[in-house]
Image (cartoon, rainbow, N blue to C red):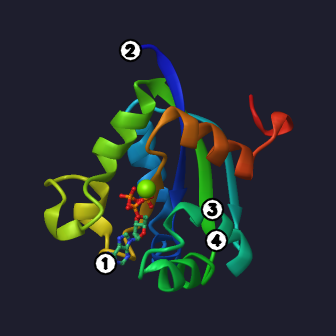
Amino acid sequence: MSIQQTLAMIKPDATARNITGKIIARIEEEGFRIVAMRKLKLSKEMAEAFYAVHKERPFYGDLTAFMSSGPIVALCLEREDAIAKWREVMGATNPEKAAEGTIRKLFALDMEKNSVHGSDAPETAAVEKAFFFNGIDFL
Ligand code: ATP
Ligand code: MG
């Protein structure tokens, strides 16, 4: 597996509890290079666009309200096998099922307020990076 990039978010439940720095420290400890980073608040419309793939799901309304309820930090991360590795470090969507030591096991409040996001494939990583960043952001 070669060097790859992924899009991560630190979600509003985490920024609200002042654990942004702890999560960023973990990102760096796991060998990711932070290529680009922004703190911003999504509008409801932006959250709906970001999670459009889930628009038929019953949790879509609540999820997009939560994701636009406070600031998020978006990061473009780079390392070997970044997409799978970041999902491994995040842990399962449901924190009750997340492995010991994963970010969601350590910090998530519930299935929705689960502290972090990560792209699930190279195609979605490319779309999600372009959602937050353009050429001037990348080092
Ligand atoms: P993410 O895409 O945020 O990295 P994921 O890939 O683990 O998480 P998805 O299935 O893509 O999970 O769901 C996107 C997000 O929607 C979840 O991270 C969570 O915040 C929320 N979510 C998913 N399933 C549920 C559910 N059953 N109830 C409430 N919220 C949910
Ligand atoms: Mg997902």
Q: Secondary structure at mark 3?
A: helix
Judged from the image, the secondary structure of the residue bearing numbered disc 2 is loop
Residue 132 sits above or below residue 70 on the image? above
Kindly check if marks 1 and 2 are in contact, taking CB atoms under 8 A apart as contact. no
Observer-side mark, 1 or 3, equals 3
Classify 122 as above or below 93. Answer: above
Which badge, 1 or 2, comes first in the chain's sequence?
A: 2
Q: Which residue is situated farthest in the front direction here?
A: 56
Residue at numbered disc 1: 109
Query: How far apart, in angstroms, are the residues tagged by discs 2 and 4?
Result: 31 Å
What amino acid is at disc 1?
Leu
Q: CA distance from mark 1 to mark 2?
A: 33 Å
The residue that mark 2 highlights is: 1
Distance from label 2 to label 3 (Cα)? Answer: 27 Å
Amino acid type, label 4: Ala
- Dot 2 or dot 3: first in sequence order is 2
Residue placed most toward the observer, 52 or 87 = 52
| Residue found 22% across the figure and 63% down from its top | 105
Amino acid on which disc 3 is placed = Phe
Q: Earlier in the sequence, mark 1 or mark 4?
A: 4
Instruction: Look at the numbered disc 4 and give the secondary structure of its residue.
Output: helix
- Callout 3–callout 4 Cβ contact below 8 Å: yes
Front label number (2 vs 3): 3
Mark 4, residue position: 47
For discs 1 and 2, the disc positioned in front in the rendered view: 2
- The tag earlier along the polypeptide, 2 or 4, is 2
Amino acid under label 2? Met
Q: Which residue is mark 3?
A: 50
Residue situated furthest right in the rendering: 136
Q: Are marks 2 and 3 in contact (CB under 8 Å)?
A: no
| Cα distance between the residues tagged 1 and 4 | 20 Å
